[in-house]
Amino acid sequence: MRIDIITTLPKLLEGPFSDSILKRAQQKELVTVEVHDLREYSTDKHRTTDDYAFGGGAGMVMMIEPIHRCISKLQSQRTYDEVIYMSPDGELLNQSIANALSLKQNLILLCGHYKGVDERVRQHLVTREISIGDYVISGGELAAAVLSDAIIRLVPGVLSDESSALTDSFQGGLVAPEIYTRPADYQGWKVPDVLLSGNPAKIEEWRHESSLKRTQKRRPGLLGEG
């Protein structure tokens, strides 16, 4: 898999991809992540990527020209499955979307900034818009990192135990069950007996019930309730 991220602030993305699972995925050559500085596609000496909005109003708008140049260059090198704009009013990211995108080969993620991008970018250059939540952050860089993490950890071979991803919250439409580790008794706070029973069938049944109860309590909307 290859993910190309277009941004005006490439340094914001150095940290998330230089440690832990995302770093190991790249070291294993299972995933390639390339960050592209949009300012390199500006044609003026100031490396301008934004301008005032037609009609007035507060805030700057990212210009279509450098974005188009960058996307066109990338698309001349390979075929992309999706060109995704990280937008607060895009479709809300969920596990199903992450699962589907993890099966793709090449993705472009465009990070918005300021008041967003020229609408013609959204109309003609991107194929999909994704939001990480109903709130506004300063730019799309952190959102792109979140989306990338959600996708990359699902790529076969990235996690040392691939079954781990299959038992994450939301994979089966439920949140994850309670989990415990040693010691079995800590100051009188005990691990449920069933988890110490050694009976796989009973343990699996308990975990399903735990997931169901947690979902009903914390995220009833997943069950069509509340």
Image: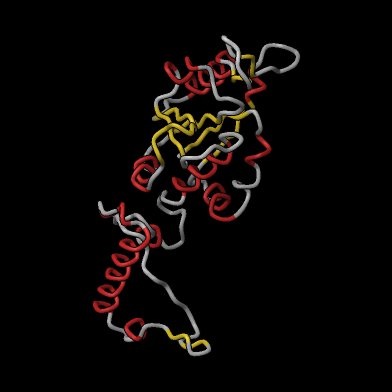
In the figure, 140 relative to 50: above or below? below
**Who's the residue at 34% across and 63% down the image?**
217
Between 157 and 178, the one nearer to me in the picture = 178
Q: How many marks?
A: 0
Q: Residue furthest top?
A: 55
Asked whether 69 or 195 is in front, the reply is 195
Residue sitting nearer the eye, 58 or 78: 58
Residue 107: percent from the left, percent from the top?
A: 45, 33
Residue 192 position (above or below residue 132): below
Quadrant of the drawing holding the N terminus: top left
| Residue 13, image x, y percentages | 62, 40
* Residue found at the far right of this picture: 45
Left/right of residue 224 with respect to residue 12 in the rendered view: left
The residue located at (55%, 31%) in the rendering is 111
Answer with left or right where residue 223 lies relative to residue 52: left
Residue at coordinates 43% horizontally, 35% vertically from top-left? 130
**For residue 72, side relative to residue 192 (left or right):** right
Q: What x and y, as percent, mark residue 138?
A: 61, 35
Q: Using the image, determine if residue 131 lies above or below residue 95.
A: above
Q: Residue at x 40, y 39 (%)?
A: 92
